[in-house]
Image: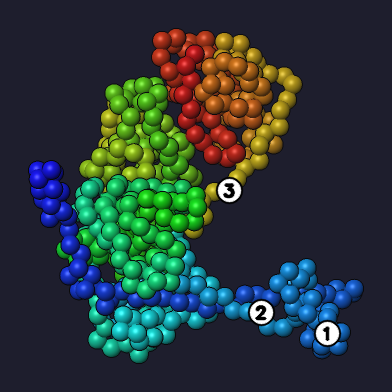
Amino acid sequence: MVALFWSQAVAARGLPDFTELVEENSAAVVNISTTSTPKKSGGFRNFDGTPFDQRQFEQLPEFFQDFFRGPNSPFGGAPGKPQPRTSMGSGFIVSSDGYVLTNNHVVEGADEIIVRLNDRRELPATLVGTDPRSDMAVLKLENGDDLPVVKVGRSRDLEVGEWVFAIGSPFGFDYTVTAGIVSALGRSLPTENYVPFIQTDVAINPGNSGGPLFNLDGEVIGINSQIYTRSGGFMGVSFAIPIDDAMNVFRQIRDKGMVARGWLGVLIQEVNRDLAESFGLKRPRGALVAEVLDGSPAQAAGLQSGDIVLAYDGEDIQLSSDLPPMVGRTPIGESASLTILRGGEEMTMTVEIGKLPEQNGAQQSAPEGGDSGSSSAPLGLTVEPIPAELAKSLDGEDGVVVTNVTRGPAFEAGIRPRDVITEINREKVGSVEDFRTVVRSLPEDRAVSVRVIRQGRAIYLVMKP
């Protein structure tokens, strides 16, 4: 028993004490409240479609007025001015002249922004600019003078397992402190692949958004941004924007009023075990180029679909999600070197990085089926030539349209009717005859790659004949 208590006491002494860190840094953490007036919608209307105005409303019997005012009124409530909406979040001061960082979703659509400091002062703030792609916003405090500021650290020095803590206003409870560890780095989320999020198990809840994530040196190394939850509350997984990326966005918004990111112009996908085997890689790694966009820097540099990007400017790419943040951080117009795998051989090329457009491409219509096709019984699919109307939308891509898929290798690979097959086992498929020829020569002892265009986007699938 003595030994047990001794070991617990030793373990307790090894845990970090956040008391001084919280005291030193709380002053620069702020609470952000916003007010916005929603656009008036709904409401009761006359039979001719005109709005039911306040004068008409007041002429109604009192019991009708009570009905229309009720929260369950089917007519959208009484006419008049819409009630303002409020929201709350967190933020932190990064300069003594009053610049504040927070999340875009905290202040989006706000008509008024009020920032409350630790000493209970309330200062109005102006929205300097936002970057929805990284979910960041920059505010400027009015009438602020010699304000407390946070110490900015370096998120690239973070390690998995490192202790971190957050200060924020979850559910409106000001200056709440929660702590945990970094559970993963470089996370790519479905909503945004240009931000390599820091994943932690720090308790983050609604109201923490935009608040700082600190290391044990009292330095901000992230901005709490998102949670993964099925209940609306904390479930042990939260995500923060790395401060290195956040400060880059801040400086661009402050100095230029906008954010510009580097752009390569490719659609990429993960390299799994089967794709690695079909492309001759010893293990899964890199980013597989499924499509090169027209007029892009990648096209100008000679990058091709089927290339696997293994390194960017000398930095290895283990997951496909590693590539977009690297490109995004590269200054526009600067050259970068790519190490790629093409045809089983590694090669290096140089590409001049362009500016990321607001929107890339558009959805394309699905092809219609026909009745004169070619069947490949061993694979379990039937194909036909690309109809003329579909060919116009494929930007010169040749291939065949899948009209039917039965149980077999093609179905197991994920090939479906209306897919356009452009390549099998790194062999171009430009016609039904090409398709037959390539299928006849497929190896029986290994997986092969199949490039298909589905709803306007190219992807690689793996098929085992």
SS under mark 2 = loop
Q: How far from the left and from the top, in percent, is residue 430?
A: 56, 24
Left or right position of 47 against 124 = right
Q: Which residue appears at 74% of the width and 78% of the height?
A: 69
Looking at the rendered structure, the kind of residue marked 1 is Glu
Q: Position of residue 347 (x, y in %)?
A: 28, 33
Q: Amino acid at mark 3?
A: Ala
* Label of residue 362 in the image: 3
Residue 158 is labelled as none
Measured along the vertical axis of the image, is residue 345 above or below residue 254?
A: above
- Determine the residue located farthest toward the front in the rendered image: 1
Give how far across and how far down residue 141 sits, in percent: 36, 83
* Residue at the image position 32 percent from the left and 52 percent from the top: 200
Taking 378 as reference, is 446 left or right?
left
Q: Nearer the viewer, mark 3 or mark 1?
A: 1
Check disc 3 and report its element: helix, strand or loop: loop
Quadrant assignment for the N terminus: top left
Tell which circle, 1 or 2, labels the residue nearer the N-terminal end: 1
Question: Given contact means CB atoms under 8 Å apart, are the residues at marks 1 and 2 in contact?
Answer: no
Q: Which residue position holds label 1?
A: 62
Question: Considering only order in the chain, which callout, 3 or 2, is on the residue closer to the N terminus?
Answer: 2
